[in-house]
Amino acid sequence: MVMEDLVQRMEQEVGPFLLEAGLVLFDCKITLYRDIKKAELLIDKPQGGILLDECAEFNRTISQHLDLDEHWKDFDISVASPGVDFPMRNAKDFKRVTGCLVRVHMKAGVEGPLQYEGQLKDVAGDQIILQIDSDEKKIGVQNIQKGVQLI
């Protein structure tokens, strides 16, 4: 089975549990190395702010479910939150940190500064709106290499 197929299958398996818990999946990584099989899930609330206890509870719930599945029972499942150092690359990632201070690094070839820092005011369609001092700057997500939340 191709790795992308495994990731898609895992996303389908955990989807109903995420929905029931009011959580979203930000990343899913499957690793197969010799006899070691791992599935790493990054989950959060739609607007961010998941607690460690919530990650642990979801880990218990999904691990119990997957242990009953012949295909997944040999996988080591780990569940974590994206955390503040998780690189943001799409509108969904940015939406999670609305209201927070962020730094965005622009893709090569995009005119203007290589990075911006400001408060993320909103995500509107395929654009983010940053409050930089007294100015608002609209930036197309397609022009951003990555963004990071600042503490």
Image (cartoon, grey):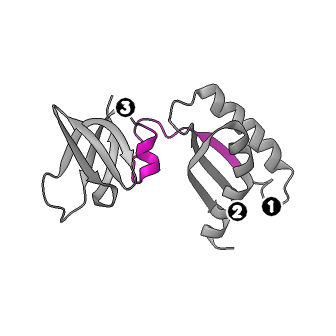
Query: Which stretch is magenta?
Result: 76-97
The residue wearing badge 2 is 9
> Is 87 a magenta residue?
yes
How far across and how far down the image is residue 73, in percent? 80, 53
The image quarter in which residue 140 lies:
bottom left
Q: 7 above or below 119?
A: below
The image quarter in which residue 51 lies:
top right
Q: 15 above or below 103?
A: below
> Is 56 a magenta residue?
no
Q: 130 above or below 145?
A: above
**Distance Cα–Cα, label 3 vs label 2:** 34 Å
**Foreground mark, 3 or 2?**
3
Label 2 packing within 10 angstroms: few (<14), some (14-19), many (20+): few
Residue 62, which numbered label?
A: none
Residue 71, which numbered label?
A: 1
Contact (Cβ within 8 Å) of mark 2 with mark 1: yes
Between 46 and 11, the one nearer to me in the picture: 46
Q: Report whether 96 appears left or right of 107.
A: right
**Callout 2: SS:** helix
Residue 99, which numbered label?
A: 3
Residue with the most extreme left position: 112
